[in-house]
Image (tube, rainbow, N blue to C red):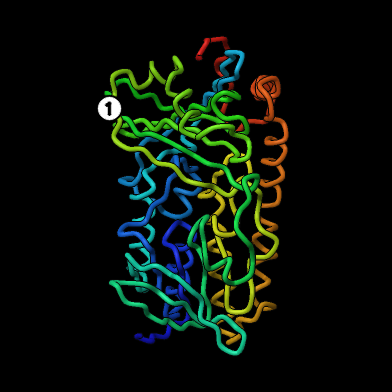
């Protein structure tokens, strides 16, 4: 067993983990970023806001398609389209997006391991001070002053740290999606969101355009579905909306995954340890979206971690500043998503929600430019 020492170990090279690794290593701290996959990436629609693209300097070649707006579909056939006055969102492929962020962290000083699975925590004098990694058939003990768990919804490290137990069916959503090749001339520039009990009882269906492909999927609270999630995906694929979108397109990929949908867990730090991203439920409880939350939270975490390492104090009290700051940052967003989720429990409620979208405050420069009945089913 090889023993190595770092100032910080980040487990999981998603947007949150790579942001932390990049910023902590920039400050001169010896940082290790590991990911269990050969190439980072997760099951995700890949929808991101322009603010994230600009703030985190995402290059043009990572962007698949810039979007013109959003179209929402109600069960009764009502369609409401919100067109952006200017570019404010885009789509990416998460594998390319996540890999870019991880490689940028490495360029800024972080050591980056792929195919490396964190399987346990190391403790000394009752405090976490490292992890056990399985890599190339060998178990490696890696010591560090702090461990950052950014290892996703199925994080074993957060559980081993005693911050949460396993998720219950009413605490996670399940998403299933298929990617289709489509003639470029048939791809529009809108994010299509479908609300219907038969497609997603507590969730939604979606069509997300890329440069040469279209992603079709569904996401719903796990406890709300009565059969396999693929049955709901099949209902989505049978709709006129999807058929007219993909036409004779060829399916090239299927993906399925769980997403935290119960809001953040009660506690995300303990001495020598910090959880971030899906691992601690930092996702929208209705949308399941996390990228727009996790990148800024990654910056907050980095600042707290650097201060803690600089003061040689990684106690729970020192790390609690992270807890305070990220909860303040997401509080309004979480409240909004809980309100939406509470009003999306039946087709009647979904009809009402889409109707009310016409009177909701819009992003500056946006406007409702069409509302009509289209019989999308």
Residue drawn 57% across the image and 23% down it: 198
The percent position of residue 32, horizontal first and vertical second, equals 40, 74
Depth check: 60 or 305 in front?
305
The quadrant of the picture occupied by the N terminus is bottom left
Residue 364 appears in the figure: no
Residue 86 visible at all: yes
Residue 21 in the image: above or below residue 186: below
Examine the rendered structure and indicate whether residue 208 appears above or below residue 21: above
Which residue appears at 38% of the width and 52% of the height? Answer: 41
Depth order, front residue of 102/83:
102
Q: Residue at x 55, y 59 (%)?
A: 279
- Extreme-bottom residue of the structure: 125
In the image, residue 225 above or below residue 121: above
For disc 1, the neighbor class at 10 Å (few under 14, some 14 to 19, many from 20) is: few
* Percent x, y of residue 325: 67, 63
State how many labels appear: 1
Residue found at x 37% / y 72%: 134
Tell me where residue 18 sits by quadrant. bottom left
Q: Is residue 316 left or right of residue 184?
A: right
- Secondary structure of residue under mark 1: strand
Q: Position of residue 81 (x, y in %)?
A: 54, 21
Query: Looking at the picture, how far across and down is residue 50, in whole percent?
Result: 48, 43
- Judging by the rendered image, the residue that carries numbered circle 1 is 250
Query: As displayed, is residue 133 above or below residue 210?
Result: below
- The answer to whether 320 appears left or right of 219 in the picture is right
């Amino acid at each position: 067993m090889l023993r190595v020492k770092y100032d910080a170990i980040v487990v999981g090279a998603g947007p949150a983990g790579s942001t932390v690794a990049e910023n902590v290593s920039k400050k001169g701290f010896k940082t290790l970023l590991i990911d269990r996959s050969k190439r980072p990436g997760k099951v995700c629609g890949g929808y991101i806001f322009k603010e994230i693209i600009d703030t985190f300097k995402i290059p043009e070649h990572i962007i698949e398609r810039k979007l013109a707006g959003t179209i929402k579909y109600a069960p009764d056939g009502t369609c409401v389209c919100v067109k952006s006055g200017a570019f404010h969102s885009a789509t990416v492929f998460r594998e390319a997006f996540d890999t870019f962020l991880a490689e940028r962290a490495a360029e800024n000083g972080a050591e980056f391991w792929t195919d490396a699975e964190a399987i346990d925590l190391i403790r000394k004098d009752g405090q976490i001070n490292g992890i056990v990694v399985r890599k190339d058939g060998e178990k490696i003990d890696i010591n560090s002053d702090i461990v950052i768990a950014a290892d996703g919804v199925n994080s074993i490290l957060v559980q081993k740290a005693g911050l949460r137990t396993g998720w219950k069916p009413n605490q996670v959503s399940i998403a299933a999606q298929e990617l289709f090749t489509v003639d470029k001339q048939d791809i529009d520039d809108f994010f299509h969101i479908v609300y219907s009990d038969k497609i997603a009882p507590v969730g939604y269906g979606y069509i997300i355009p890329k440069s040469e492909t279209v992603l079709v999927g569904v996401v719903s609270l796990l406890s709300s579905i009565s059969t396999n999630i693929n049955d709901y995906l099949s209902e989505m694929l049978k709709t006129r909306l999807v058929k007219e979108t993909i036409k004779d397109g060829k399916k090239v990929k299927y993906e399925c995954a769980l997403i935290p949908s119960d809001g953040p867990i009660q506690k995300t730090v303990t001495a020598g340890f910090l959880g971030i991203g899906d691992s601690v439920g930092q996702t929208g409880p209705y949308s399941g979206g996390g990228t727009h939350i996790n990148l800024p939270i990654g910056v907050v975490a980095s600042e707290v971690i650097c201060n803690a390492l600089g003061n040689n104090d990684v106690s729970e009290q020192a790390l609690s500043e992270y807890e305070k700051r990220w909860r303040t940052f997401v509080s309004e967003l979480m409240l909004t998503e809980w309100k939406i989720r509470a009003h999306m429990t039946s087709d009647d409620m979904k009809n009402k929600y889409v109707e009310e979208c016409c009177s909701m405050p819009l992003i500056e420069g946006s406007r409702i430019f069409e509302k009509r009945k289209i019989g999308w089913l």
